[in-house]
Image: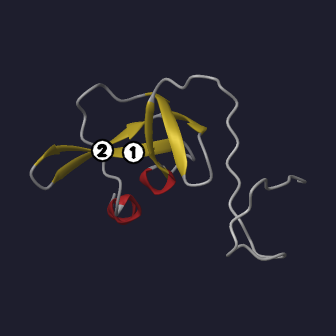
Amino acid sequence: MQFSIEDAPATLAIGQPVRVTAQNGAGVSGIIVPRDAVVRGGNGEALVWRHTDPERFEAKPVRTEPFDATRVVIRAGIATGDRIVVRGAEHLNQIR
């Protein structure tokens, strides 16, 4: 990818890694969660863990799309108000 930086800060050096964010202007509908919140089930389907009661969790199949390098958009599979595990989902998936 080639790009140029206009009005670069004095602290930026040639060859220094930078993060580039590009926007395409398209709207996104769904729930944005960290990529680690979505795990794979035994049959390979995408799952999230829903917190139902104290110390009780339920695996819910979801349909996702990438949002950026660290997050995904959940398009279907969870309802408004559902509490989703975003840290430690992989550990719950191992216990299943």
Task: Give left or right: position of 2 versus 23.
Answer: right
In this view, the residue farthest toward the left is 54
The mark lying in front, picked from 1 and 2, is: 2
Q: Which residue is mark 2?
A: 84
Task: Give left or right: position of 56 versus 48.
Answer: left
User: Going 9% across and 51% down the picture, which residue do you hit?
Assistant: 54
Residue 14: quadrant of the picture: bottom right
User: Going 90% across and 54% down the picture, which residue do you hit?
Assistant: 2
SS assignment at label 2: loop
User: Going 83% across and 76% down the picture, which residue do you hit?
Assistant: 15
Which amino acid is tagged 1? Val
Which amino acid is tagged 2? Ile
Q: Are marks 1 and 2 in contact (CB under 8 Å)?
A: yes
Residue 87: quadrant of the picture: bottom left
Q: Which residue is mark 1?
A: 48
User: Residue 16 at what x, y percent from top left?
Assistant: 76, 76
Mark 1 Cα shell of 10 Å, populated few (<14), some (14-19), many (≥20): many
Which one is earlier in the sequence, the residue at label 1 or at label 2? 1
User: Residue 94 at what x, y percent from top left?
Assistant: 39, 64
